[in-house]
Image: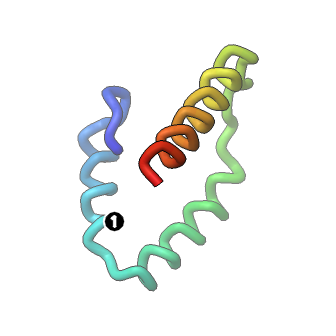
Amino acid sequence: MHTLLMTAAGQHILEDFESLTDIEKREVLSNLLKISKAIEYPETSDDELVDAADAVFLAYDTLEQNG
């Protein structure tokens, strides 16, 4: 999934990632998780958490209806 905030370079990385084998993807993800610990992330607001929870429950409802 590409967002409007993602740069062209970020989109290029995702496209390259999608072309990797599953083994290569796992290795890349492992390394990204290791280096991402050093990134400072902004605080998540209560509204953002509620929106995320709503999205998860909506996805579950959709799965149940189609399942």
* Relative depth, front residue between 4 and 57: 57
**Residue 61 vertical position relative to residue 42 in the rendered view, above or below:** below
Is residue 7 left or right of 50 when viewed as pictured? Answer: left
Question: Which residue: 53% across, 47% down?
Answer: 64
Q: Give the percent coordinates (x, y) of residue 51.
A: 61, 22
Q: How many labels does the image show?
A: 1
Which residue occupies the foreground of this view, 46 or 67? 67
Question: By what rule are the colours in the image chosen?
Answer: rainbow
Residue 47, quarter of picture: top right
Circle 1: residue type: Phe
Left or right: residue 55 versus residue 49 is left
Q: In which quarter of the image is residue 21?
A: bottom left
State the SS at label 1. helix
Q: Which residue is drawn at 35% across and 44% down?
A: 1
- Tell me residue 13's x, y (percent): 32, 56
The residue that appears at 69% across and 37% down in the rendered structure is 40
The image shows residue 44, relative to residue 38, as above or below, that is above
Q: What residue did someone put label 1 on? A: 17
- Nearest the eye: 2 or 6: 2
- Name above or below for residue 52 compared with residue 63: above
Q: Residue at x 67, y 34 (%)?
A: 41
Is 4 located above or below residue 17 in the figure? above
- 66 sits to left or right of 54: left
Percent of width and height locating residue 62? 48, 40
Q: Mark 1 packing: few (<14 Cα in 10 Å), some, or many (20+)?
A: some
